[in-house]
Image (spheres, rainbow, N blue to C red):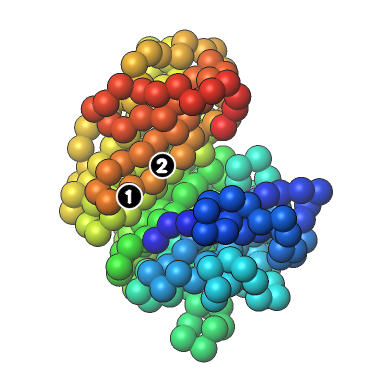
Amino acid sequence: MRIISILLFLIFGTVFSSCKNEKGKESANNTLIGKGQMPNAVSDEAGNVHIAFGSGDSIMFSSSADKGKTFSQPILVSVLPGLAASHMRGPQIAATVNGPAIIACDKAGDVFSFYQSKSGEWIEGARVNDVDTVAKEGLMALDGDRGILFAVWLDLRDGHNKIFGARSDDGGKIWSVNKMIYASPDSTVCECCKPSVSVDGVNVYVMFRNWLNGNRDLHLIQSVDGGANFSAAQKLGDSSWALNGCPMDGGGLIVSQKNVHTVWNRKGNIYANEPGKPEQKIGSGRG
């Protein structure tokens, strides 16, 4: 369940979509979706596109039934006082056979969940984090496939940022006991880089920027049992980035036809990498 037909832009606080034609070129006309920040989008198995974004303390939702050509008028999901919706922080959306679901974090560090009923009404589910105010960085990700939703976030329980996760099997109504996915032996993972998650059947892939031996490198970790257990973390890329600071860039992760694709920034260059294969430099810039 991935974005195929649209690219999202954040311009002067306005959410736009840009459609592509059959040859993959952007059309001349953009579609105004609504006023807001930090849009996040997903497509479901039927090709419907679902978008969540922040607008002040409001979580907003819009959808498209024609693969991104037109979008519905944004509706209010919920008002979350202190909604985190800037600097890569914002509502995250995913879709399963149960329908779309959203998670959102407030500035106190709690992650809330919402799911859409069959009638289209948005309902608040259980809180995702099972210890109070541990997601103070507000950096999180959500993905789903078939009946599984999986959320990951930077978690400050015990005083240091770790990668934690939780699973929902009912579309976001109830969440599992939180699971620590990774803790750096050097005390913390990178503090200001958004983690990524991709779910493919019972396979759950989590990518995050680590802080290990003074290096800020991307690592990938995998579960083959729906997030119950995770393998050892695997470093991505051929070189390391020694940096006494945070690059504020967590990269991107997608699984397509059982192949894992990652893209990320190192020293001002953008690289693409499939685990176990040499990295490919795409160009200079920032993610």
Identify which residue, 82 or 215, lies in the foreground.
215
Residue at screen point 60% across, 46% down: 89
Which residue was labeled with disc 2?
253
Q: Is residue 15 visible?
A: no
Which residue was labeled with disc 1?
256
Q: Is residue 155 left or right of residue 181?
A: right
Residue at screen point 53% across, 51% down: 24
Residue furthest to the right: 12
Residue 227 marker: none
Q: Quadrant of residue 174?
A: bottom left
193 to 227, vertically: above or below: above
What's under tag 2, amino acid-wise? Leu
Q: Is residue 286 left or right of residue 224?
A: right
What's under tag 1, amino acid-wise? Ser
Q: Quadrant of residue 181?
A: top left
Spot occupied by residue 118 in the image (x, y as percentages of width and height): 46, 86
